[in-house]
């Protein structure tokens, strides 16, 4: 693929990445990869091409910007999309491995997936906050219904109803508090990455 990659680079593109149309792997891995890429595109805040991996050709200025980013848990394909510039993809069919064994076992694949989501997304923390809010809402609604039955019909359930309600209510409040704390931690996390606010593509004139 080096020749079509380099031809696109000569046309003025800064990043030319590979898009896998087919891959010779077991069916569950194919499903897992396809599902992850589509879930990631929904969760993250970058427009990362679906089914594109690390394999690409990049201009020197993109490489320099990548190397200047100080973050430690590096998800290259996400960082590459975040940098921007003129990018395009080339579709190809990935053949089976000719020799050797993969250096990415399941544990490393999970680590890569977590880096891809957590480095570019606020969705996990927002999901916790949303679950906490929904739990409080449902508990409050159920509490109102129990009070209504008790006052109007005097048929409210007896026993552990109050304890269950309190546990659910405080559990929702705790989840919401964790989510709010997570929002502050997220801002610290993204701040410590030290990414630039913008990247200068070219300087015109003096």
Image: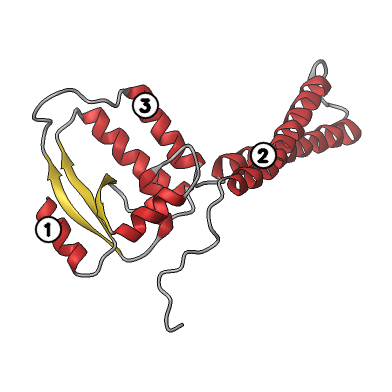
Residue 135: give x, y in percent of width and height.
70, 35
Residue 21: give x, y in percent of width and height.
18, 47
The residue carrying pointer 2 sits among few (fewer than 14), some (14 to 19) or many (20 or more) residues within 10 Å by Cα, namely some
Between circles 1 and 2, the one closer to the viewer is: 1
Q: CA distance from mark 3 to mark 2?
A: 25 Å
Residue, x 19% and y 27% (percent of image)? 26
Mark identifier at residue 108: 3
Q: Is residue 201 above or below residue 148?
A: below
Residue 81: give x, y in percent of width and height.
38, 55
Q: Residue furthest front?
A: 206
**Is residue 125 rendered to the left or right of residue 18?**
right
| Label 1 sits on residue | 4
Residue 111: give x, y in percent of width and height.
42, 30
Residue, x 47% and y 37% (percent of image)? 73
Q: Secondary structure at mark 3?
A: helix
Residue, x 45% and y 54% (percent of image)? 46
Q: Is residue 74 above or below residue 18?
A: above
Q: Secondary structure at mark 2?
A: helix
Q: Of label 1 and label 2, which has the lower sequence position?
A: 1
Mark identifier at residue 182: 2
Judging depth in this view, the residue of 204 and 6 nearest the camera is 204
Residues at circles 3 and 1 in contact by the CB criterion of under 8 Å? no
Image quarter of residue 130: top right
Q: Of label 3 and label 2, which has the lower sequence position?
A: 3
Q: CA distance from mark 3 to mark 1?
A: 30 Å
The residue carrying pointer 3 sits among few (fewer than 14), some (14 to 19) or many (20 or more) residues within 10 Å by Cα, namely few
Can residue 10 be seen?
A: yes
Q: Of label 3 and label 1, which has the lower sequence position?
A: 1
Instruction: Identify the colour scheme used.
Output: secondary structure
């Amino acid at each position: 693929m080096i020749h079509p990659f380099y031809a696109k680079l000569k046309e003025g593109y800064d990043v030319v990445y590979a898009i896998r149309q087919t891959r010779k792997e077991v069916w569950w891995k194919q499903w897992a990869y396809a599902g992850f890429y589509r879930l990631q595109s929904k969760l993250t805040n970058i427009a990362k091409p679906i089914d594109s991996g690390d394999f690409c050709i990049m201009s020197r200025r993109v490489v320099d910007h990548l190397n200047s980013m100080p973050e430690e848990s590096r998800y290259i394909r996400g960082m590459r999309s975040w940098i921007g510039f003129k990018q395009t993809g080339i579709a190809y069919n990935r053949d089976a491995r000719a020799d050797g064994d993969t250096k990415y076992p399941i544990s490393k694949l999970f680590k890569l997936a977590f880096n891809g989501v957590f480095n570019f997304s606020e969705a996990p923390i927002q999901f916790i906050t949303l679950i906490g809010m929904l739990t409080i809402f449902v508990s409050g609604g159920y509490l109102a219904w129990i009070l209504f039955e008790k006052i109007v019909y005097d048929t409210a359930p007896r026993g552990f109803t109050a304890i269950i309600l309190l546990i659910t209510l405080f559990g929702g409040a705790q989840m919401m508090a964790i989510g709010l704390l997570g929002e502050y931690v997220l801002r610290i996390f993204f701040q410590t990455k030290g990414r630039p606010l913008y990247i200068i593509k070219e300087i015109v004139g003096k």
